[in-house]
Image: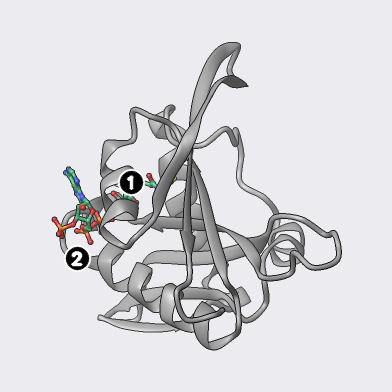
Amino acid sequence: MEIKNLEQRHYSDVSRIYQQAIDAGNITLATKTSPWESWDNDHLKNMRFVALEDNAVIGWVALSPVLQRTGYHGVTELSIYIDENHHGKGIGNMLMQHIIDSSEQAGIWTIMSFIFPENDKSIALHKKFGFNHLGTQHKSAQLKGVWMDNCILERRSTIIL
Ligand SMILES: CC(C)(COP(=O)(O)OP(=O)(O)OC[C@H]1O[C@@H](n2cnc3c(N)ncnc32)[C@H](O)[C@@H]1OP(=O)(O)O)[C@@H](O)C(=O)NCCC(=O)NCCS
C-alpha cells in the first residue's frame, strides 16, 4: 500500500468509493457524487491523498475549509472513505495518520468531522487519533426526509501553538 497525492486521474475511483457511502444510506447527507471541478474547488489542493494497492485506489482522505472568515484558515473538515472491499485492513489508520502529519506540517491547527452517531467505526477511528467529541447536534439535518443527529468531533493540534 502506498499513499500518493490525489489527482484528477484518480477521481473516478474516488467518486466510486464515495458512492458506496451514499448507497449505504447512513454515512453522508450527499445523494450524489460531485463533478471533478466542484470537488476540486471544495477541497484544499495540498491536503488530498489516495491509498493505492497495485496502482488501484482503495481509499482517500481530504480536508476542506470550514470557515472563510479571516483567522480561521487553519480550521478544516475531514473526509475519509475506504473502499468497502478493503475495510478493516488498516487503510483508515494509515490515511488518518498521513493527513494529520501532513496538515500539521502545513500549519493547519484543527481538523473537524461531523459524524452520524450510528457510524461507530468512524467515531472509534477519530477517537483513536485524538479527536474529542465536542457535542451532538440533534435533528441537525435531513437525509431523505429523516432527521439526523450529528456528532461534532475535533482534533486540535498540540504542535501548532
Ligand atoms: C470508518 C473507516 C474510514 C475506517 O477505515 P478502515 O480502513 O476500515 O479502518 P482500519 O482498519 O484502519 O481501522 C482503524 C480504526 O477504525 C476503527 N474501526 C475499524 N473497523 C471497526 C469496526 N468494525 N468496529 C469498530 N471500530 C472499527 C477502530 O478504531 C480501528 O482501530 P484499530 O485498528 O486499532 O482497531 C471505513 O470503515 C469507511 O470508509 N467507512 C465508510 C465511510 C465513512 O464512514 N467515512 C467517515 C465519514 S464521517
Mark 2 or 1 closer to N-term? 2
- In the drawing, does residue 18 fall left or right of residue 30? left
Marks 2/1: CA distance?
A: 13 Å
- In the drawing, does residue 36 fall left or right of residue 130? right
Q: Element type at marker 1?
A: helix
Q: Is the residue indicated by label 2 positioned so its CB lies within 8 Å of ligand 1?
A: yes
Label 2 Cα neighbours within 10 Å, binned few <14 / some 14-19 / many ≥20: few
Q: Is the residue indicated by label 1 positioned so its CB lies within 8 Å of ligand 1?
A: yes
**Residue 36 position within the rendered picture, expressed as x and y whole percent measured from the top left:** 69, 62
**Residue 25 position within the rendered picture, expressed as x and y whole percent measured from the top left:** 43, 27
Q: Which residue is mark 1?
A: 122
Q: Element type at marker 2?
A: loop
Residue 71 seen in the figure: yes
Residue closest to the eye, 119 or 58: 119
Is residue 159 placed above or below 132 in the rendered structure? below
Residue under the image location 70 percent in, 55 percent down: 66
Is residue 122 placed above or below 82 in the rendered structure? above
Residue closest to the eye, 83 or 151: 151
Q: Are marks 2 and 1 in contact (CB under 8 Å)?
A: no
**Residue 98 position within the rendered picture, expressed as x and y whole percent measured from the top left:** 38, 78
Q: Which residue is mark 2?
A: 90
Number of disc labels: 2
Residue 151 seen in the figure: no
The three-letter amino acid code for the residue at tag 2 is Gly
